[in-house]
């Protein structure tokens, strides 16, 4: 673990993770009523840290670091007609997408950290904390939409000196 990540791990303790917003979209709303088995579908993931800010308690005894995370899942699936004809469509066509934002609240354990430390914390510790909430949310929404076999993979933290 790098020194920067080590410092980032020590700056705060998680207090809460809140869903900030969510969006689900069918590419073809006419087929939305049909339960879809998406075995063989390709999943494109996005993740990022949108912003962060500090909130101080009224009596100045506690400082929260708040970090907003954005996630997305785009489902690419070959049409049934193309699959039957054996057509190559690359990754296929967009079947649907799920997007969500979460805010993580972290109680600072010392002084306010430098912006670089907050950035490192958000992209490592923060992402590790919030990723399970995103996975469950995406899976739950997918099931409610009638989409089978939609599972967001585990989050893997990589460091610069890690081999691929």
Image: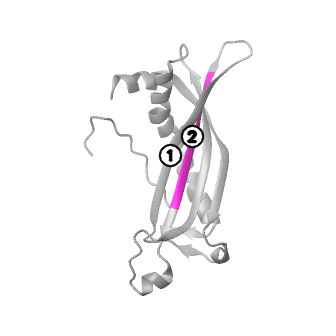
Disc assigned to residue 47? 1
Q: Classify mark 2: helix, strand or loop.
A: strand
Q: Residues within 10 Å of mark 2 (few under 14, many from 20)?
A: many
**CA distance separating discs 2 and 1:** 7 Å
Q: Is residue 47 above or below residue 27?
A: above
Q: Is residue 37 above or below residue 103?
A: below
Secondary structure that dominates the magenta span: strand
The residue at the point 62 percent across, 73 percent down is: 28
Residue 105's quadrant in the figure? top right
User: Residue 73, percent across and down?
Assistant: 53, 56
* Quarter of the rendering occupied by the N terminus: top left
Packing grade of label 1 (10 A; few <14, some 14-19, many >=20) is: some
Q: Secondary structure at mark 1?
A: strand
Measuring 66% from the left and 72% from the top, which residue is drawn there? 29
Q: Position of residue 16 (x, y in %)?
A: 62, 34
**Residue linked to disc 2:** 69
- Residue 67 falls inside the magenta stretch: yes
Q: Mark 2 touching mark 1, by CB under 8 A? A: yes
Percent position of residue 83, x then y: 43, 82
The image shows residue 92 at horizontal and vertical percentages of 46, 71
At x 46%, y 61%, the residue is 43
Q: Is residue 68 visible?
A: yes
Which residue: 44% across, 54% down? 153
- The part of the chain drawn in magenta is 64-74
| Residue at the far right in the pictured view | 58
**Sequence-wise, which precedes: disc 2 or disc 1?**
1
């Amino acid at each position: 673990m790098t020194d920067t990540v080590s410092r980032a791990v020590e700056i705060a303790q998680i207090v809460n993770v809140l869903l900030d917003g969510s969006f689900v979209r069918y590419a073809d709303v006419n087929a939305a009523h049909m339960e879809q088995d998406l075995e063989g579908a390709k999943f494109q993931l996005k993740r990022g840290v949108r912003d962060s800010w500090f909130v101080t308690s009224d009596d100045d005894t506690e400082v929260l670091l708040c970090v907003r995370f954005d996630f997305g899942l785009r489902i690419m699936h070959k049409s049934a007609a193309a699959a039957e004809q054996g057509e190559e469509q690359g990754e296929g066509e967009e079947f649907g997408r799920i997007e969500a934002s979460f805010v993580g609240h972290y109680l600072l354990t010392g002084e306010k950290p430098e912006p670089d430390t907050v950035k490192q914390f958000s992209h490592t510790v923060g992402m590790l904390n919030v990723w399970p909430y995103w996975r469950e949310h995406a899976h739950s929404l997918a099931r409610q939409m009638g989409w089978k076999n939609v599972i967001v993979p585990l989050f893997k933290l990589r460091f610069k000196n890690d081999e691929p």
